[in-house]
């Protein structure tokens, strides 16, 4: 794994980090022991960036992270969390300084720290991005020392472009993978120009790009790949990257032909993301220690050739873009 600066913040992070949604919940039955083992394996492999959120398991993910880091006692990695999705209803009017401070205080307790390394607005309603007072509130919380920096996790490219107009926004988290290539058309260029860190999430399209999912794969009732298949619980773009299941399976078979001998499709998909110099860190999740180790090892794959990159773009434009490109 390579190490580089996290945008304008005084952190150095590995280009592969640990996505902690799975160890919180909504991915079927993952025991706390497996979650701890996965996180420890990621840290043992050298990862120095962890991404979580206050709603992942209603704080379970944050608490597991705190306990593991306390037990290890070594130099702490950068830990990013998110706030806003605890609002019910989840509306722009709820993004007040008072509410955000309450969410941040809860995360401070869950993560057992005095200051959060990074807090991200958690895919807020678009109107939030047109309310300067929200970002003024975050500036005040930063000055008070409760957060070291703040960013925005977004669903749409347009929301990312709007968010980085605020000078205090140091990072954007966005879906970017072989099935969601639109950020590379314009957004990444603007992010680089402003030295904004990019966190690439949903790198394997909820497992589709692992190449292991088939039409017969069963997902548990508490797995979002079951209950959010059509966007029933949150934005459908978070499940299979918004790609219709059958279309995704068809595209996977074409991507499979591009995977170099000896590599897994998951490693190939992660290496594809790392080909972009705009991406600061990619955050695959892991159900267990073996998956965490494999994620770290993906960075060791040789760079993909221009022909392979062109082939993935052709597959995207022919089979996937009609379903997702203008939507997100």
Image: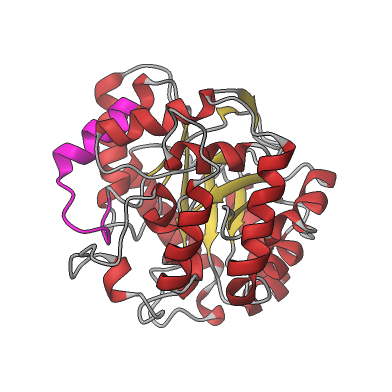
Residue at x-position 54% and y-position 26%: 301
- Indicate yes or no whether the magenta region holds residue 291: no
Residue 284 position in % (x across, y down): 43, 44
Is 289 or 134 nearer to us in this picture? 289
Q: Eyeballing the image, is 105 above or below 122?
A: above
Q: Which residues are magenta?
A: 24-41
Q: Eyeballing the image, is 11 above or below 228?
A: above
Residue 35 position in % (x across, y down): 23, 40
Residue at x-position 55% and y-position 66%: 97
Is 318 or 9 nearer to us in this picture? 318
Residue 12 visible from this viewpoint: yes
Looking at the rendered image, the quarter that the C terminus falls into is: bottom right
Residue 42 position in % (x across, y down): 36, 29
Looking at the rendered image, the quarter that the N terminus falls into is: top right
Most distant residue in the top direction: 74
Residue 56 position in % (x across, y down): 32, 57
Residue at x-position 18% and y-position 38%: 34
Answer with left or right where residue 220 lies relative to residue 88.
Answer: left
């Amino acid at each position: 794994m390579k190490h580089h600066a996290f945008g304008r913040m005084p952190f150095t992070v590995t280009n592969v980090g640990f996505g902690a949604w799975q160890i919180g919940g909504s991915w079927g039955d993952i025991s706390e022991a497996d979650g701890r083992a996965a996180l420890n394996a990621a840290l043992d492999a050298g990862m120095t960036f962890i991404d979580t959120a206050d709603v992942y398991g209603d704080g379970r993910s944050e608490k597991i992270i705190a306990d593991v880091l306390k037990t290890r006692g070594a130099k702490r990695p950068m830990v990013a969390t998110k706030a806003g999705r605890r609002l019910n209803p989840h509306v722009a009017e709820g993004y007040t300084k008072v509410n955000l401070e309450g969410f941040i205080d809860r995360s401070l307790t869950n993560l057992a720290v005095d200051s959060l390394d990074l807090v991200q607005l958690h895919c807020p309603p678009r109107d939030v991005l047109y309310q300067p007072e929200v970002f003024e509130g975050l500036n005040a919380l930063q000055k008070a020392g409760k957060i070291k920096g703040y960013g925005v996790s977004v669903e749409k490219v347009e929301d990312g472009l709007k968010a980085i107009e605020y000078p205090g926004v140091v990072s954007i988290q966005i879906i970017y993978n072989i099935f969601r290539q639109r950020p590379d058309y314009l957004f990444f260029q603007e992010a680089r120009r402003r030295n904004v860190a990019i966190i690439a999430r949903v790198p394997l399209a909820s497992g589709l790009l692992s190449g292991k999912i088939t039409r017969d794969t069963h997902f548990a009732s508490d797995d979002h790949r079951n209950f959010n298949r059509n966007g029933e619980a949150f934005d459908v773009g978070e499940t299979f990257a918004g790609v219709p299941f059958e279309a995704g399976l068809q595209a996977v078979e074409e991507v499979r032909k591009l995977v170099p001998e000896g590599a897994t499709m998951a490693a190939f998909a992660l290496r594809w993301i790392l080909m972009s110099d705009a991406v600061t860190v990619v955050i695959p999740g892991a159900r267990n220690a073996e998956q965490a180790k494999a994620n770290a090892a993906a960075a060791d794959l040789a760079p993909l050739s221009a022909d392979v990159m062109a082939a993935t773009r052709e597959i995207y434009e022919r089979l996937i873009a009609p379903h997702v490109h203008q939507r997100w």
